Amino acid sequence: MSAVAKLRPAKVRSALKRRWFERRLPTLALTPMPGLEDVGTPYGGWTIPFGLVTPDWTCWTVGAGGDISFDLALLDRGATVRSFEPAPVYVEHAREQAAGRDRFSAHQVAIAPTDGPIRLQVTHHEGSNSVSSAHLYDTEGDHIEVPGRTLASLQAEFGDARVDLLKLDIEGAEYDVMPTVDLRALGVSVFSTQLHHTGSVADARALIAAVEAQGYAAVACRPVVKLTFVRNDLLPAGL
């Protein structure tokens, strides 16, 4: 059987939707901001105003995956880093990679609109352990159940006065979660998130508009639609 014949229609449709989505979103207008740096590896990194990060910052990195180079760079700046990840393999990997760093902790939890158990689809991609509550993957595959928590309830549990930097990469669930998130109440200065093709281009633009309405400006967009926003009062005067 040829390779083309083996392709499932659903998989082809998903791939085409992803490519269209990733091609359209980077055309959004960005606010110019000096001092942006690519932090971490090309795969696991994010573009942020790295100079803003100081030792008194508390950074939450939601969705550690298999690459915590971004987290390690924040630790090198002296910041406190809390990593949240539903896949147990990735939680253990993060703890191993950051072993001995007393400002780092990793927690197995899925960020959700409400507190309570959440069922997550395990990816079909070989070599990956990613999970999604938003049917991101092409096959149903296996599932795991983990605690689901809101950002607000986690902040209350940990007692962090501010979440100065929030990175949110939750495999397509951002369209359900973000309408429930008050970035100002969390104390967020820098917000980074990856947008996935589980939503339409219109859904993604609506999410971006909602973040901007909270008082944040989009300043960077990396490939695969990894966006960074900065609170408006931290932008250089005149922008």
Image: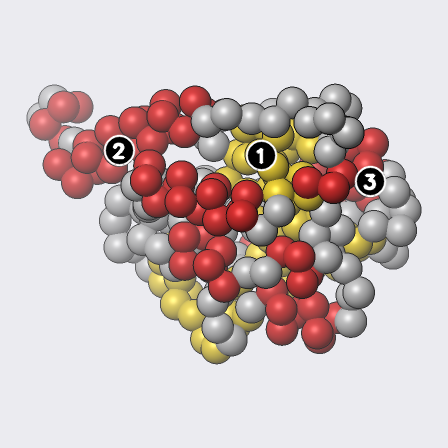
**Coloring applied to the structure:** secondary structure
Residue named by callout 1: 218
Q: Give the foreground label among 3 and 1.
A: 1
Q: For mark 3, what is the residue?
A: 53
Q: Name the front one of labels 2 and 3.
A: 3
82 or 141, nearer to the observer: 82
**Does residue 203 appear in this view?**
yes
Q: At x 55% / y 60%, what residue is drawn?
A: 181
Along the polypeptide, which appears first: circle 1 or circle 2? Answer: 2
Within 10 angstroms of label 2, few (less than 14), some, or many (20 or more) residues? some
Question: In screen coordinates, is 54 left or right of 179?
Answer: right
- Which of discs 1 and 2 lies nearer the camera? The answer is 1
**Residue 172 pos. (x, y %):** 40, 49
Q: Position of residue 128 (x, y in %)?
A: 46, 43
Q: Earlier in the sequence, mark 3 or mark 1?
A: 3
Specify whether 30 is left or right of 184. Answer: left
Which residue type does callout 3 highlight?
Val
The number of discs equals 3
Tell me if I can see residue 82 in this picture: no
Judging from the image, what secondary structure is the residue with disc 1 in? strand
In the image shown, does 108 or 156 lie closer to the viewer? 156
Residue type, label 2: Lys
Q: Quadrant of residue 219?
A: top right
Label 2 residue SS: helix
Front residue of this view, candidates 17 and 145: 17
Q: Nearer the viewer, residue 126 or 114?
A: 114
Instruction: Look at the numbered disc 3 and give the secondary structure of its residue.
Output: loop
Mark pair 3, 1: CA separation: 18 Å
